[in-house]
Amino acid sequence: MNDAVPAFLQYMTVERRMSAHTLDAYRRDLDALQRWAEARDRSVDALDGEHLRSFVADEHRRGLSAKSLQRRLSACRGYYAWQLKHGRLQVDPTLGLKAPRAPRRLPQVLDADEAVRLVELPPDGELGRRDRALLELFYSSGLRLSELCALTWRDLDFASGLVNVLGKGNRQRRVPFGRPAREALEAWRAETNGAPAAPVFPGRNGPISQRAVQVRIKQLAQRQGLFKHVHPHMLRHSFASHILESSGDLRGVQELLGHADIATTQIYTHLDFQHLAKVYDAAHPRAKRQPNRSPDAGSPEDGSPA
């Protein structure tokens, strides 16, 4: 692999705080670019825009999905932008380069009743109090899974009902949490030492793992009678959809979720529109199906009113 690529990945780890999962994907993407360039006796740093268009086209013909191609191009853009910033390149070869458009899937959400049923677990025993606090905070604040796992007690301001979050791109934000979440967290803190630097949700070696939370939420959803594929991000989607449905404030939802680009948040307007469309179909007189005509109904041909 090009000597510059490990340095770029180190930069993305330390300065951009890229997750391990995304970092592995970037490494695979840049490795694929390296192999493609070497097969043509070229260096990755000597590729131009036409070369990269050919690379994308070849990967597409090889069966790579539009979503995977978009991520592959994102890795290339990040790498060449980093090269440009350090004066190793004069021109960014990814300028004007686009991946095939991927079909946009609407996120699945829980309705309000399902969300309440999930989070209102009986807080029995130590594990029950932890699970109740975890679910209440997740749904109350719309955190990302990685953000929730990384929380320490000093990040929670119980007096003001705010949680300090370090999100993607090392961006900080403050998100409110409601009274049920505060009460559940206080009950859980009483079970732990509650030291400021301690993780709110500890695992075997430090903070609880993301995988452990995914497995646990799936188990709890089934226990509560929700036989959907319930996963942590569904709680974040549900939080955003319910807030937007009630407030209509897209910009506010963007701030709460920590989205850098409002276009990312706009997908929830589609969910909200689907809900409104169902209400319209069910309630508006002109949206209802016309009843079938009776056999003796008149027709325009016989002069009777249609």
Image (cartoon, helix red, strand yellow):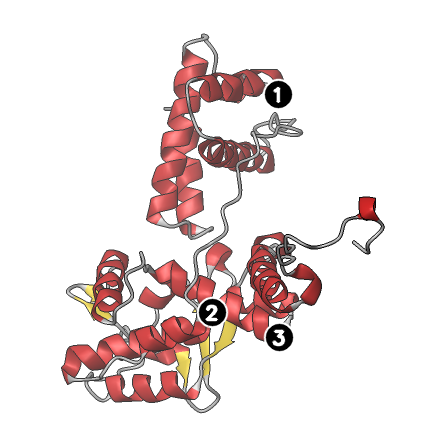
Horizontal and vertical percent position of residue 204: 15, 65
Secondary structure under the numbered disc 3 in the rendered image? helix
User: Decide: marks 1, 2 in contact (CB < 8 A)?
Assistant: no
**Which of the pair 12/86 is nearer the observer?**
12
Give the labeled residue for mark 3.
Answer: 247
Determine the CA span between mark 1 and mark 3: 45 Å
- Identity, as a three-letter code, of the amino acid under mark 3: Ser
Quadrant location of residue 124?
Answer: bottom left
Determine the CA span between mark 3 and mark 2: 12 Å
Give the labeled residue for mark 1.
Answer: 49
Give the labeled residue for mark 2.
Answer: 239
Q: Mark 3, residues whose alpha carbon is within 10 Å: few (<14), some, or many (≥20)?
A: few
- Identity, as a three-letter code, of the amino acid under mark 1: Gly
Lower sequence index among marks 3 and 2: 2
Secondary structure under the numbered disc 1 in the rendered image? helix
Q: Mark 2, residues whose alpha carbon is within 10 Å: few (<14), some, or many (≥20)?
A: many
